[in-house]
Amino acid sequence: MDQEKRPQVYVGMAADIVHHGHVNILKCAMELGEVTVGLLTNEAIQSYKRVPIVSFENRKLLMEHMKGVEHVIPQTTLDYRLNLITLKPDFVVHGSDWKKGKQTTIRLEVIETLAAWGGKLVEPEYTSGISTSEIIERMKESKKESKSD
Amino acid sequence: MDQEKRPQVYVGMAADIVHHGHVNILKCAMELGEVTVGLLTNEAIQSYKRVPIVSFENRKLLMEHMKGVEHVIPQTTLDYRLNLITLKPDFVVHGSDWKKGKQTTIRLEVIETLAAWGGKLVEPEYTSGISTSEIIERMKESKKESKSD
């Protein structure tokens, strides 16, 4: 593959609490090319979910340390279009879970936007049994704690 | 540096919920050489802290996807000595926080064990304001939730 012009891959993520579901998405993305993570800003996360647990800056530090992640840029809205039009990636990678629920419209906009330059949406199967919200629930049940890790 | 014989670096971690504090430790470790993470088993974590939120297998998947982590092996007790004697690493890296509190004895045993082959303990300054336990507390305060990430 020509190292000078690798396919560009865009992955939008909140990455508030990072788990192996994120790893599965990133593994898929890095096989496709050069990965840019569009990290949702706090405002973007709040718009559809909750106030994030971890600050944008610290989420960025963690995401930059994940294998295969070459760039991390802010995604300031849940709407991908502004970043996509700017970057014109060859691929967007997102878990298959957004085919249903709140993000259905966002997904369709991504497909339509990518089509303008022949870009494709790739949707690895959603990693079941894990999500940040599930981790939060498990944590709420966690009784025994200590001061630090 | 001779790529065939890089210094060996050992990092013991629970890595239940990974945050930028872990990244700081890993950045320090990878600058020193070839990093093996000794991932605490569930039993090891329970022995001093709490039941882990995330399974060993899934913690391993995430840790293996962190930049600079070349090997992940189990550390079955809070006591490092068995793994250290087996691997004889040139360096162990741990945050400076364990100079106080429950792990003081563990730390002294690490220093003493490493001394047998001239290994050194490296202790980057603990990243304040973040720990898994603090994240758990913030999560408990988290009101608004949704089904998935």
Image (tube, coloured by chain):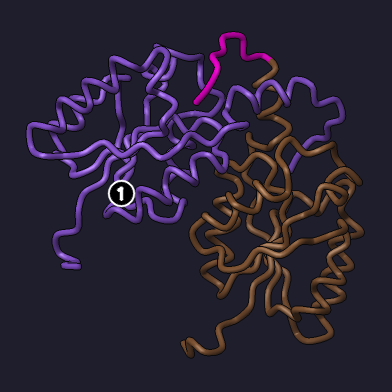
Chain colours: A brown, B purple
Q: Left of A101 or right of it: where is A6?
A: left
Query: Residue B15 in the image: x percent, y percent?
Result: 47, 33
- Corner quadrant of residue A78: bottom right
Question: Mark 1 belongs to which subunit?
Answer: B
Query: Residue A103 in the image: x percent, y percent?
Result: 87, 52
Out of B80 and A84, give the one closest to the viewer. B80
- Corner quadrant of residue B78: top left
Query: Residue B58 in the image: x percent, y percent?
Result: 49, 37
Query: Residue B123 in the image: x percent, y percent?
Result: 36, 36
SS at badge 1: strand
Say which residue label 1 marks.
B35
Q: Residue drawn at (70%, 42%), measured in percent from left and top?
A: A16
Q: Amino acid at mark 1?
A: Val
Q: Magenta part of the protein: which range? A: A141-149
Which residue reaches farthest left? B116
Q: Residue drawn at (75%, 49%), measured in percent from left and top?
A: A97
- Corner quadrant of residue B25: top left
Q: Residue drawn at (86%, 76%), measured in percent from left and top?
A: A113
Label the magenta part by its dominant secondary structure.
Answer: loop
Q: Residue drawn at (45%, 37%), measured in percent from left and top?
A: B125
Out of B134 and A37, give the one closest to the viewer. B134
